[in-house]
Image: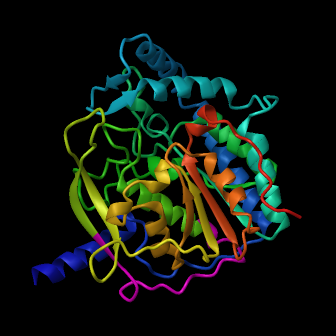
Amino acid sequence: MKALLFQLSVAAVLAVTSGCDGAEVPQRGRPRAKRLAAQGAALDAALERMKTSGIDAPLRAALEELVAREGDWFRLEDGAGLGRYAVESHIRWTERALAFDDADHPLHAIVAHARQLEAHGIELLVVPAPTRLQIYPDRLAGVPAQGSGFLGHAPETTAFLRVLVDAGVEVLDLLPVLAGARDDPRHHDPVLRDRLYLDGDYHWTPRAVALSSAAIASRLAQMPSFERGPARTDEDFVVRIERGQYVLAGKNDPEPEPVSWPQVLSAAGGPAHEKDRESPLLLLGDSFAMQFKERGCDLASQLYACTGHRVDAITFAAGSTKTWAALERRADGLAGKRWVVWVFTARALQLAKFETVELFSD
């Protein structure tokens, strides 16, 4: 009976905790122009909201105060940690985001790759993973506390995404997805419901991965070309949620951190997803896409549950742009691919060098 009750409780909260339980993703095919128009309107509304938030000045002051300190790792009042690299890259991006004349500005490579793919009938979805500072700016001293309606603060990244949409590139803004869930009262575990980023590391938690995967699957379903894959819950995989701990070995926080594990598992109990080179769905990503693979909580596993497709993946730690060069080296013309999802930390927009590669030989 206890096992049955556990399964029922998992089913009741799964849509909130992991965002997807393997059920059919509603097919809502919309023409590309309408999809881009909707994305642009949403980004415009977000920019207007951020202009009147009153966050910019106190956030800048708080960041400059941290930079003036000694050391490379800062412990915030709520227990979370923040690296100097994260603070400095946030400041630099505010200055570089719209500097499109820079030869290595990410805009040029992203647009070029999107157009190459489009010319060969392949859809690209660009998905920057928000940083902790964009979801939790009010964790810094002096920044006004934000209420339950807060949807994140990243005016420079939002403006950059708006320019991408104007250039015909489809984007998924995860900022409202994650910020809107940072204190979701529906979450099954009040202790964990606000944990979207690890305290001792700059990566997100398994819960944030699962929520993001569900949002990606929902966006893919808006594409007329999208079809759900053959995998089905309870036949090819099960989704099980456990409360546990994550140990950041060798990192800045030696204490285990409490997390919820929304796991996509096989009948034998191990991770159900296996990379499939023949899949029509290709995931490109950095360490944000690779996190928690050993528990079946990584991005590819979650997308498998949400879309029914085994995922082909090219991922590298600190490899936001390396994936494109690796894709070029395959030299197979992306045979059989229909959708490419590129997920990378938003920090990479400032830190990485973005170079255009030729994906097709014709």
Q: Residue furthest right?
A: 362
Q: Residue at x 49, y 58 (%)?
A: 212
Q: Is residue 234 magenta?
A: yes
> Looking at the image, how many numbered discs can be counted on the residues?
0
Q: Position of residue 135 (x, y in %)?
A: 46, 40
Where residue 94 sits, quadrant-wise, is top right
Q: Residue at x 70, y 40 (%)?
A: 354
Foreground residue, 101 or 144?
A: 101
Where residue 341 sits, quadrant-wise, is bottom right
- Report the span colored magenta: 219-240
Seen in the picture, residue 189 relative to 20 is either above or below; the reply is above
Seen in the picture, residue 135 relative to 228 is either above or below; the reply is above
Foreground residue, 261 or 15?
A: 261
Seen in the picture, residue 352 relative to 30 is either above or below; the reply is above
Viewport quadrant of the C terminus? bottom right
Q: Residue furthest left?
A: 1
Viewport quadrant of the N terminus? bottom left
Main SS category, magenta section: loop
Q: Residue at x 27, y 73 (%)?
A: 10
Q: Is residue 324 visible?
A: yes
Q: Position of residue 286 (x, y in %)?
A: 53, 49
Q: Is residue 33 visible?
A: no
Foreground residue, 77 or 341?
A: 341
Is residue 305 toward the left or the right of residue 79 in the image?
right
Q: Is residue 57 magenta?
A: no
Q: Residue at x 64, y 45 (%)?
A: 321
Q: Position of residue 59 (x, y in %)?
A: 48, 23
Q: Position of residue 112 (x, y in %)?
A: 81, 50
